[in-house]
Amino acid sequence: MYLKDLLTKEQHDIRQTIKKFVDKEIMPIREKLEEDYSLVESVHKKLVDMGIQRAGYPEEYGGGGSHSATTLGIVCEELARGDAGISLSTGINGGIILQPAMMAKNKAILDKFVPAFCENKVNYACLSMTDSAGGADSENPLLKGKYIATKAELDGNEWVINGNKSWPTHAGLASVYLTVCTTDPKLADDGIAIIYVPGDAKGLSFGKPETKMGYRTSINGSVFYDNVRVPKEFRLAGPGHDAHFYYAVMGGAQWHSSTMSLGIAQAAFDIALAYTGERMSGSRPVREWSLAAGVLADMAIRLETTRALVYNYAWMMDHPEQYGPPFTPEMVSRAGIVRIYAADAAVWVANKAMELLGSNGLSPEYHLEKYLRDSKITQLWLGGQQVSRYRVVRGYYDYTVG
Ligand SMILES: Cc1cc2nc3c(=O)[nH]c(=O)nc-3n(C[C@H](O)[C@H](O)[C@H](O)COP(=O)(O)OP(=O)(O)OC[C@H]3O[C@@H](n4cnc5c(N)ncnc54)[C@H](O)[C@@H]3O)c2cc1C
């Protein structure tokens, strides 16, 4: 609510447009989307037609040239109020994967991969980061790439990549895989390499889509690299710099996760507010009893605190001249705070909403059970809540692990 004054007129209009889109195109088919991926694709196509996919890409490739994290946050929050999987895919395809290449101004990568995202069709990107041997270790900046298991070796003018990743979103669908690997784990940060791999590269293969409790509208699977060769120019920026970009990706992804937690919490709160206003208990609606009103108040407190944190961090990303680049321990730490708080808030709010709906909360007819399932995942990915906490403390003191 108080955010209204902080947004530009354009951002306010974008929020209204996406809100209307979600109410019309997603809300009426929330459950069906989980059962039929062709419906999900048709929602994505409508978003492409609205210019959402290309908005964050450079204008010289046909993109919209928007650099605003606040605007992206608005879009992702509103979409997650309808469906978190669609929100996740929209953020990933809308520039999060190619953002490091835009920041590094790596023309070979941009020329190869950006144009497809500016066309009038759905195009998928993938953050291929979680090593099958253990995602938490490879995603923990304190470990400085020591346990990244996917290897890249330079052979003439090509990188040769070998390794396995588990769970990346859009595995098997994407035209580009931002692959986190190491040239030599002993080199620590200098060994970390971010290499962009085309979806049709020889030696790249995929597992079957995972069955999962939530986020059923976005596809996850394994990615296998078997002597995958790509031009050496597809390495992002070189020793040391790639580690910085990896930590920036980690910060950005944590914040992106929090926008989805926020949308999920808002949806659960809306459902509980409406239901308890109609459902009678004795002589009055449920929400007119003080115990229920107190639960709604606690939900609202967590919801609005999450919103303040999410847009506070977006503001920091939008003002690097004041807060520094996104890879500093301070910025990654802040993103961890937002992500942990938002994920816990979404799970808490969805759980309390379930209590207020009673047994009806379990029925798909009331839409709530889907949000509860989706909320849990925002606590688990990106190294989970524990590794996120390591990222948080690293912003305050030099915490070291083995
Ligand atoms: C819906 C969904 C979407 C996903 N999307 C992507 C994606 O786009 N790209 C991608 O690369 N991955 C993706 N993932 C994978 C996800 O990021 C990883 O599963 C996650 O980071 C945890 O890795 P892991 O499962 O291997 O956990 P493990 O490494 O096996 O760790 C298990 C748990 O142990 C705990 N733990 C581990 N180490 C420590 C420690 N040192 N101290 C304390 N506790 C510790 C943590 O709680 C951790 O969660 C996705 C997962 C899901 C469910």
Image (cartoon, rainbow, N blue to C red):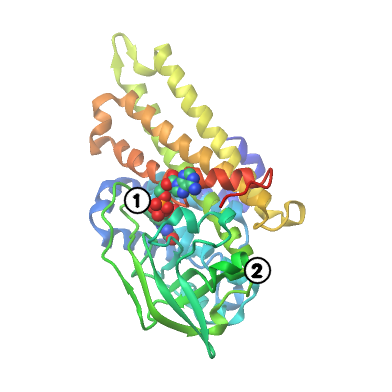
Residue flagged by tag 2: what amino acid is it? Gly
Mark 1 Cα-neighbour bin, 10 Å: few <14, some 14–19, many ≥20: many
- The residue at the far right in this view is 322
- The residue at the far top in this view is 283
Tell us which disc is closer to us: 2 or 1: 2
Residue flagged by tag 1: what amino acid is it? Tyr
* Up-down relation of residue 315 to residue 113 (above or below): above
Residue that appears at 59% across and 72% down: 101
Q: Which residue is mark 1?
A: 215
In the image, 180: left or right of 267? right
Residue that appears at 43% across and 60% down: 130
* Up-down relation of residue 199 to residue 145 (above or below): below
| Residue 261 x, y percent position in the rendering | 46, 43
| Residue 213 x, y percent position in the rendering | 29, 46
In the image, 211: left or right of 341? left
On whether ligand 1 comes within 8 Å of the CB at mark 1, the answer is: yes
Closer to us: 148 or 224: 148
Q: Which residue is mark 2?
A: 240
- Give the quadrant of the N terminus: top right
Cα separation, mark 2 vs mark 1, equals 34 Å
Residue that appears at 55% across and 43% down: 389
In the image, 319: left or right of 85? right
